[in-house]
Image (cartoon, rainbow, N blue to C red):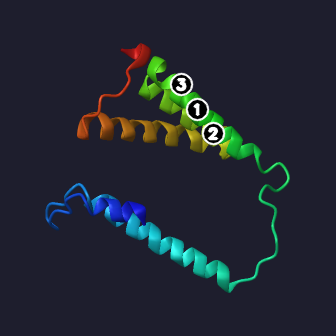
Amino acid sequence: MITAWSSTSLSMGKSSRPGPGFLPFGLAIILIALSIALIAKSWKKEEQSVPFWPERGWVRPVLGVGVFLLYALLLPPLGFVFTTFFFLIFWMWIIERIRWVTILPISIGVTAVLFLIFSYFLEVPLPAGFLG
């Protein structure tokens, strides 16, 4: 609610040309609606108590956070293409446990598409790393 209220101080713009306040306001409204729906759903059902972390259920989330931290640390020295490719391979192999036949094409395709989107279409300078 605070985000929706704060974004009203920014210009909303027109429907053909949205202003800087349009996106935060719209996303805040969507989040408010989804939160109300989730609260209403939880009040309707009485569920049995389920432990927050089932036995060894904490391993994958902790490993995921560690992999993201490693990705952030290795991105500048190794570059976007190399780091993203190996990040995707590691994530799908260790965390998601997908077969190699599927991992390699997905990693190559996602890395190529992200590189094209960010560098050519959005013109975002990506870290080149040792590939220069």
Secondary structure, mark 2, is helix
Q: Residues within 10 Å of mark 3 (few under 14, many from 20)?
A: few
Position of residue 67 relative to residue 39, above or below, is above
Give how far apart the Cα atoms at labels 2 and 3 are: 12 Å
Q: Quadrant of residue 102?
A: top right
Position of residue 56 relative to residue 123, above or below, is below
Q: Residues within 10 Å of mark 2 (few under 14, many from 20)?
A: few
Q: Quadrant of the C terminus?
A: top left
Please identify the residue farthest to the bottom as the structure is shown.
Answer: 44
- The residue tagged 2 is 65
Give how far apart the Cα atoms at labels 3 and 1 are: 6 Å
Please identify the residue farthest to the right as the structure is shown.
Answer: 55
- The residue tagged 1 is 69
Q: Are marks 3 and 1 in contact (CB under 8 Å)?
A: yes
Give how far across and how far down residue 33 sits, in percent: 46, 74
Q: Nearer the viewer, residue 45 or 10?
A: 10
Q: Quadrant of residue 16?
A: bottom left
Mark 2: amino acid? Val
Give how far apart the Cα atoms at labels 1 and 2 are: 6 Å
**How many dots with numbers?**
3
Give how far across and how far down residue 18 sits, in percent: 19, 60
Mark 3: amino acid? Leu
Q: Are marks 1 and 2 in contact (CB under 8 Å)?
A: yes
Labelled disc at residue 73 = 3
Which residue corresponds to the image point at 62% horizontal and 42% vertical from the top-left? 92
Q: Is residue 97 visible?
A: no
Give how far across and how far down residue 85 sits, in percent: 50, 32
Mark 1: amino acid? Leu
Secondary structure, mark 3, is helix
Which callout, 2 or 3, points at the residue further toward the start of the chain?
2
Secondary structure, mark 1, is helix
In the picture provided, is 83 more to the left or to the right than 90?
left
